[in-house]
Image: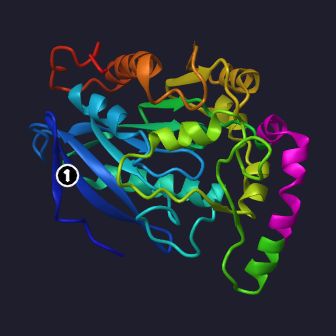
C-alpha cells in the first residue's frame, strides 16, 4: 500500500493533504482537509465523504469539503477502490459491498488521525454514496451525525427509473462480463452515463451533461463501469437500513430526481428515528452547482455544526456562504 503522500495543497483557511489508507487488499486515495490550528492538542471533528456511482472525489466534492472546513470541521474525501487514483484490480468494477468496506476503512483511518476527535465523526454521501451513508450510519452507532444527499435507496426502483428497455439492453454485456470474469479476462464495460436511447447505467436526459459538468479541467474521468456491476446495484437496497440509524441524519432529496426516485427515497428516509428530511427543487445532478448547491451546503453546514460542535468558532460567513 502507498503511504501518505508528502505533497500538501492549501485551500482558504485550511490545509489539504493527499493521503492513502488501506482498504481490503489494496488502498483508497483521498484528500484530508484540516482547518487552521488542528493538531493532536486541538483535535477537530471529521466528516468522511464519498461520491456516487462511478464518480471520483474530483467530481464536485471539493466545494462541499471546503465549506465544512471553513466552519471548523475536518473532512476526509476519498475515492473507492478500482476508480481514479485509488488502488484495486480489476478496474471499474462497482461492487456495493466492496464500497461499503471502503467506508469502514475510511472511518477507521479518520479515527486514527492525531488531529481528529474520534468521538465526533460524521459521514456525508451523495447519490450512491448517499445510499452508502444510510447503510454505513446504520452499522456505526458511534457516529455523531450523517448527511445523505440525493440518495440511491433501492436498486430495483432505480432500474425502473432507467426503463425496462434500457435495463434489458444491459443483459448481453452483463453475461459477457460474467464470462470474462470466469475466464480471468478484462471486464466488459458500458458507459456510466450516456444520452437517452444509448446503452449505459444512466441515460436520463440530464445524466451525461450533469456528470461532465462536474469534471474539472485537466481531470480524466473514466466514463465506464464493468457490466457485472449492474447485478450488485440491483441487489442493493440501503434504504431498508434507515430504521436502524441511531444518530441524527440529514437526508436531502431531489424533487425531480431522474436516477433515485424521490418518492422511494422519501419513504425510506421517513423511517430514520432521528431523520431530518428535506426536499430541494433541483435535479439529481444539480446538487453540486449554482443556487441548489448554495442552499444545500448552507443547510448541511448548520446541521453538522449543530451535532459535531467544533470547538473553534466558525469564521464569519461560513454558515451563510457567498458561493457564486
Residue 250 at x, y = what percent? Answer: 51, 23
Q: Quadrant of residue 43?
A: top left
Task: Give the quadrant of the N terminus.
Answer: bottom left
Residue 42 at x, y = what percent? Answer: 12, 39
214 and 48: which one is in front?
214
Most common secondary structure along the magenta stretch: helix
Q: Quadrant of residue 171?
A: bottom right
Which residues, given as a range, are shown in magenta?
156-175
Q: Residue placed at 57% from the left, 53% from the top?
A: 54
Work out whether residue 215 can be spotted: yes
269 in relation to 217, above or below: above
Mark 1 sits on what residue? Answer: 114
Q: Is residue 174 magenta?
A: yes
Q: Residue placed at 75% from the left, 64% from the top?
A: 228
Residue 263 at x, y = what percent? Answer: 75, 21
As helix, strand or loop, the secondary structure at mark 1 comes to loop
Work out whether residue 133 can be spotted: no
Q: Residue placed at 77% from the left, 49% from the top?
A: 198
User: Could you tell whether 120 is left or right of 145 in the image?
Assistant: left
In the image, farthest residue toward the bottom: 183
Amino acid at each position: 500500500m502507498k503511504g501518505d503522500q508528502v505533497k500538501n495543497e492549501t485551500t482558504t483557511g485550511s490545509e489539504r493533504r493527499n493521503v492513502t489508507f488501506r482498504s481490503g487488499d489494496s488502498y483508497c486515495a483521498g484528500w484530508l482537509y484540516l482547518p487552521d490550528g488542528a493538531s493532536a492538542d486541538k483535535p477537530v471533528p471529521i466528516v468522511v465523504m464519498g461520491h456516487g456511482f462511478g464518480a471520483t472525489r474530483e467530481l464536485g466534492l471539493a466545494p462541499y469539503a471546503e465549506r465544512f472546513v471553513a466552519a471548523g470541521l475536518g473532512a476526509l474525501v476519498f475515492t473507492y477502490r478500482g476508480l481514479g487514483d485509488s488502488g484495486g484490480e480489476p478496474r471499474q468494477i462497482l461492487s456495493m459491498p466492496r464500497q461499503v468496506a471502503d467506508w469502514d476503512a475510511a472511518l477507521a483511518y479518520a479515527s486514527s488521525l492525531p488531529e481528529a476527535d474520534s468521538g465526533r465523526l460524521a459521514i456525508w454521501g451523495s447519490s450512491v454514496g448517499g445510499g452508502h451513508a444510510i447503510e454505513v450510519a446504520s452499522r456505526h452507532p458511534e457516529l455523531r451525525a450523517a448527511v445523505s444527499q440525493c440518495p440511491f435507496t433501492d436498486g430495483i426502483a432505480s432500474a425502473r427509473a432507467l426503463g425496462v428497455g434500457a435495463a434489458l439492453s444491459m443483459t448481453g454485456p452483463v453475461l459477457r462480463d460474467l464470462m470474462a470474469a470466469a475466464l480471468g479476462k478484462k471486464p466488459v464495460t458500458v458507459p456510466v452515463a450516456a444520452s437517452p436511447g444509448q446503452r449505459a447505467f444512466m441515460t436520463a436526459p440530464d445524466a451525461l451533461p450533469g456528470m461532465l459538468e462536474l469534471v474539472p479541467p485537466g481531470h480524466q474521468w473514466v466514463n465506464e463501469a464493468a457490466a457485472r456491476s449492474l447485478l450488485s446495484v440491483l441487489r442493493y437496497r440501503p434504504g431498508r437500513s434507515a430504521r436502524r440509524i441511531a444518530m441524527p441524519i440529514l437526508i436531502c432529496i431531489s424533487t425531480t430526481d431522474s436516477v433515485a426516485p424521490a418518492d422511494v427515497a422519501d419513504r425510506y428516509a421517513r423511517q430514520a428515528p432521528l431523520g431530518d428530511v428535506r426536499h430541494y427543487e433541483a435535479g439529481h445532478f444539480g446538487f453540486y452547482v449554482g443556487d441548489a448547491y448554495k442552499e444545500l451546503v448552507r443547510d448541511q453546514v448548520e446541521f453538522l455544526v449543530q451535532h459535531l460542535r467544533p470547538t473553534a468558532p466558525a469564521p464569519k460567513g461560513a454558515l451563510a456562504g457567498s458561493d457564486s
